[in-house]
Image (cartoon, rainbow, N blue to C red):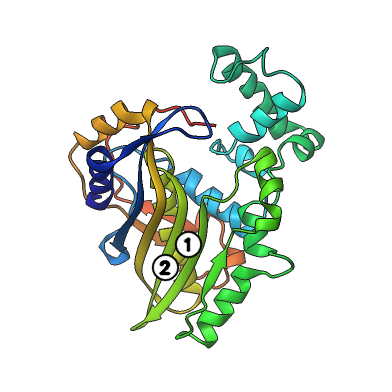
């Protein structure tokens, strides 16, 4: 996907060195936008293999209003594990025994995740992220924003208020306790010529690990909402605030840029599903995905 490669190249050419919350360090730019026509194919990167099953399960998890990682780990999705795990270590006074990113830290995290998977009481206590995306999407101060925006698209397609916000200032401290305040904070739908488009504003973006997931997730959400509203999928527009490459991802990004971009895959969605709440993992089929091998990188916590 050329748009993503252009973003990486822009960060290398124009980015500035900045410190960050994790202590890792970044190369960062402020303000950038990509546009993707969803009729061109499903925007899943081909210059490295992306675990699309995690993207689907995470999106279904958001739409369920779930905020506990147990559903994710039971379905082999490990993208949220580090934050509640680090919170657990801090709460138990185990940070010195398990220094962050050490071999001991990684080994103990496997034990933590296994307990989340098998022990419901442990998961309820330590797998909870707080009022993150799922809560805000489905219960923002009592408002089900997803249900409201779907109904509004159906009944008032020309409205300029098709907006869902995950940024709830009152609950940011609770989100930060064992998870993260929302990075993809607000999205807006737009209807024209029988097509549904979506623009996402992302305040903070890990361009190597996070952004490929965010692109595919919101493209898929746009396709799902379009289907339940009787529309075709239009464009996905991705707008960034601070978009950054962590310093420990630079060699991986250069490797990715050296690879040839391959044709985009197609995402087939079960046409019988007419309600967002009825979608299941089995309703999605990724077709003709032929990526280069995955490129490993450490998430910054």
Coordinates of residue 170 in the picture (x, y in percent):
70, 57
User: Where on the picture, by quarter, is residue 239?
Assistant: bottom left
Residue 21 is left or right of residue 239, and the answer is: right
Q: Which mark identifies residue 221? A: 1
Residue 13 is left or right of residue 188, and the answer is: left
Choose between 270 and 77: the one closer to the eye.
77
User: Where on the picture, by quarter, is residue 139?
Assistant: bottom right
Q: Is residue 224 above or below residue 82?
A: below
Badge 2: how crowded within 10 Å, few (<14), some, or many (20+)?
many
Whether residue 295 is visible: no
Determine contact: label 1, label 2, CB under 8 Å: yes
Choose between 143 and 243: the one closer to the eye.
243
Residue found at x 56% / y 75%: 149
Choose between 210 and 50: the one closer to the eye.
210
Name the secondary structure under disc 2. Answer: strand
Q: Is residue 113 above or below residue 203?
A: above
Coordinates of residue 173 in the picture (x, y in percent):
69, 47
Image quadrant for the C terminus?
A: top right
Q: Tell me the distance, in whole angstroms, between the alpha carbons under discs 1 and 2.
A: 9 Å
Choose between 94 and 39: the one closer to the eye.
94
Whether residue 125 is visible: yes
Badge 1: how crowded within 10 Å, few (<14), some, or many (20+)?
some
Coordinates of residue 196 in the picture (x, y in percent):
40, 74
């Amino acid at each position: 996907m050329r748009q993503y490669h252009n973003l990486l190249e822009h960060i290398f050419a124009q980015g500035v060195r900045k410190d960050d919350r994790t202590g890792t360090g970044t190369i960062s730019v402020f303000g950038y936008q990509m546009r993707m026509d969803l009729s061109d194919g499903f925007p899943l990167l081909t210059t490295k293999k992306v675990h699309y099953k995690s993207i689907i399960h995470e999106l279904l998890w958001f739409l369920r209003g779930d905020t506990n990682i147990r559903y994710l780990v039971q379905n082999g999705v490990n993208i949220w594990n580090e934050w509640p795990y680090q919170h657990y270590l801090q709460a138990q006074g185990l940070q010195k025994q398990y220094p962050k990113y050490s071999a001991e830290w990684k080994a103990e995290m496997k034990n933590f995740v296994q307990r989340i998977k098998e022990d419901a009481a442990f998961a309820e206590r330590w797998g909870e992220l707080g009022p993150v995306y799922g809560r805000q999407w489905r219960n923002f101060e009592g408002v089900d924003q997803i249900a409201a925006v779907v109904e509004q698209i159906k009944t008032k397609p020309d409205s300029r208020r098709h907006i869902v916000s995950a940024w709830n200032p009152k609950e940011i401290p609770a989100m930060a306790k064992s998870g993260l305040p929302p990075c993809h904070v607000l999205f807006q739908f737009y209807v024209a010529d029988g097509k549904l488009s979506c623009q996402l504003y992302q305040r903070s973006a890990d361009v190597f690990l996070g952004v490929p997931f965010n692109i595919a997730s919101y493209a898929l959400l746009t396709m799902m909402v379009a289907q339940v509203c009787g529309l075709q999928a239009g464009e996905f527009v991705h707008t960034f605030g601070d978009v950054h490459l962590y310093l420990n991802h630079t060699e991986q990004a250069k490797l990715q840029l050296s690879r040839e971009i391959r044709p985009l895959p197609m995402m087939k969605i079960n046409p019988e599903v007419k309600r967002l709440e009825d979608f299941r993992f089995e309703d999605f089929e990724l077709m003709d995905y032929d990526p280069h091998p995955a490129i490993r990188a450490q998430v910054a916590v």
